Amino acid sequence: MPLIKKAAFLSSILLFQCAAVIFSTVMFLDGRYAGKVQQGITVNDVPVGGLSPVEAVQRLESTIPDPPLSALRIKDAGKSYVIYLPDIDGIYDYRSTIEEALAYGKKGNIFDRFTSTPQLRAAPIDLAIKIAFSEEKLAEKLKCLKDEWETPAEDAEVKLSDDKVIITPEKKGYSLDLEKTLEQVSRDLAGGNLNVAASGRILEPPISTSDLNGIDTLLSEYITTFNNSDENRSHNIALASAAINGTLLKPGEVFSLNRQLGPRLAESGYLEAPVFIGNGLSLDFGGGVCQVATTLYNTVLLSDLEVVERYPHPQPVSYVSPGRDATIAGDYLDLKFTNNTGAPVYISSLLESGKSGTLTVSIFGEEKSKSHTVRITSEKTVFEPKVIVVEDNSLPEGETEVVNSGRAGYEARVYREVVVDGQVQSRNQISSDYYISEDKIVHVGPKPEGTVKK
C-alpha cells in the first residue's frame, strides 16, 4: 500500500476512534445527568448541580424565599421608577428556573454537549431566578410611570423684567413608548432581571437658547383692551394670542397670521362671536381674532418691520383708531410681515384679566440704537352721515322716530416716522383706508291737515 494511502487510512481510523470516544462520553454524561442538573450550575449563587428537579426546587425554596420588598427598578434618561413585586403579584418562579437549569448543556449537537461539562467546570454558570407576575397589574403600574415621566418640551423664552430682556433656557421633554416598555419590562422581569431600561425618547424643543442669539431688546409693544363679559369672544382672543405667543422669526422670514392660527373652526376650539360679514356684524366661529391681528399689526409697525399684506375692516373698530386696524378671513385675507432685520425677532402675546381684558403683544430683537425710535401718526377726514327723512303714516301726526342713527365715514391715512436723536429722519405713508358712512334714517308722522307741503 502506498505511503500516502496508508497515512489516510490510519487517519480515518483515528478520527473514527475519537468520534467513538466523544459519542461514548456524551452518552455516559447524558446517562449520568439524566433527570438531573449538570454540575457547575447555580441559581442566584445557590448550587443546584447534580440535583433532581424536585430536589433543586426544594433547595431554592429553602435558600431563597420570596422577599416581600423586592423591587423592580426602571430607568431612562436620568429618571428612575420603582415597582415593588408584591404590588404586581410578583413571586419567584422556582420550577421554571430549574427547568432552564435542567436543559442547560443537553441541547445542540454532540460537540456542544461534549464540551458543556468541562466548560461548566472551568466557568460555572449562575442563572437568575425567574419571576412570575401579573401582566395586568404591571401594565397599570407602567401607565402611572408614563403619567409621571411624560413631560412636554418647553421652548426658550424671551421676557422683559425690570426693563431688561431675560432669556429663559429651554427644557427638554420626555415621551415614553408604553407598548415597547411593557414588552421589554415583561421579558426582563420574567427572566429575573430587576433593573430594566424603559423605551422612551428625549423631546427637543423647537426653540433653544442658541436660536435667540442676537435678541437683546424690546423693539416695541402694543396694548388693546376688550370686554371680558363677552365670554366667547374673550375665549377666541385667548386662543389666538396663545397661538402667536413664542413665535420666532429668522432674518428674512415671512410671518403669516393665517398660517400661524390655522382654520378658525369649532374643531380647533373656536366659539361663535360677532364678526364683520359684509358691512354688518354676524355670529361666526373665531369672532375676536381680528383684535389679535390688529394688536400684532401695530406692534409690527412700531418695530419697523416690513408689512407685506394687511386689510382693514369695512367699518372702524372700537379698540383702535381708524386706519390702525387689521382683519383676517378664511385663507384669503391675511396679515403678513417680514423680519427685515439682521437678527431673529421673537413675538410675545399675553392676556391679563381685570375689569376689562388686556392684550399685550411685544416684539423683541436686536437693538439698533438707543437714539433710534419709530412713531406712528395718522390723519383722518370725517364724512358725516346724510340724514334721510321718510314720511311714515303709521306714526302720529308730527311725531318722529330715528330708525337708523347712521354712522360717520372716514378716510384715514397712516404714516410711519423714524426719529433719530429727536429729529424726524423719514416719514412714509403706510396706508390709506376709506370707511363708508351710513345714512341716518328718520321717520316722521304725517303733517296736520291744511299744512302746505313745500
Image (cartoon, grey):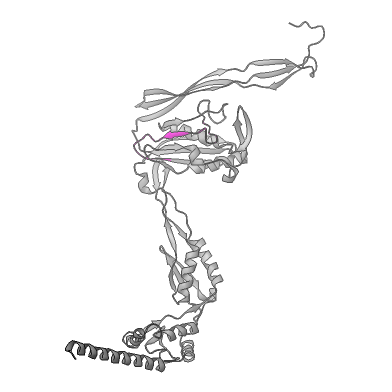
In this rendered view, identify the residue nearer to me: 394 or 35: 35
In this rendered view, identify the residue nearer to me: 87 or 349: 87
Is residue 223 in view from this perspective? no
Number of numbered discs present? 0
Is 343 one of the magenta-colored residues?
Answer: yes
Image: 44 above or below 206? below
Residue 160 picture location, percent across and down: 42, 42
Image: 382 above or below 26? above
Please report the residue visible at 37 percent of the width from the left and 26 percent of the height from the top: 419
Please report the residue visible at 46 percent of the width from the left and 58 percent of the height from the top: 175
* Rendered-image quadrant of the C terminus: top right
Please report the residue visible at 62 percent of the width from the left and 22 percent of the height from the top: 407
Res 270 → quadrant: top right
Is 342 one of the magenta-colored residues?
Answer: yes
- In the image, is 184 to the left or to the right of 14? right
In this rendered view, identify the residue nearer to me: 404 or 44: 44
Image: 299 above or below 98? above
Image: 164 above or below 425? below
Res 405 → quadrant: top right
Residue 77 picture location, percent across and down: 41, 62
Q: Residue furthest front?
A: 1
Please report the residue visible at 48 percent of the width from the left and 41 percent of the height from the top: 244
Q: Residue furthest left?
A: 3
Res 21 → quadrant: bottom left
Residue 239 picture location, percent across and down: 54, 43
- In the image, is 346 to the left or to the right of 236? left
Is residue 28 in view from this perspective? yes
- In the image, is 246 to the left or to the right of 343? right
Please identify the dominant SS of the magenta region.
loop
Residue 16 picture location, percent across and down: 29, 90
Span colored in magenta: 325-346
* Rendered-image quadrant of the N terminus: bottom left
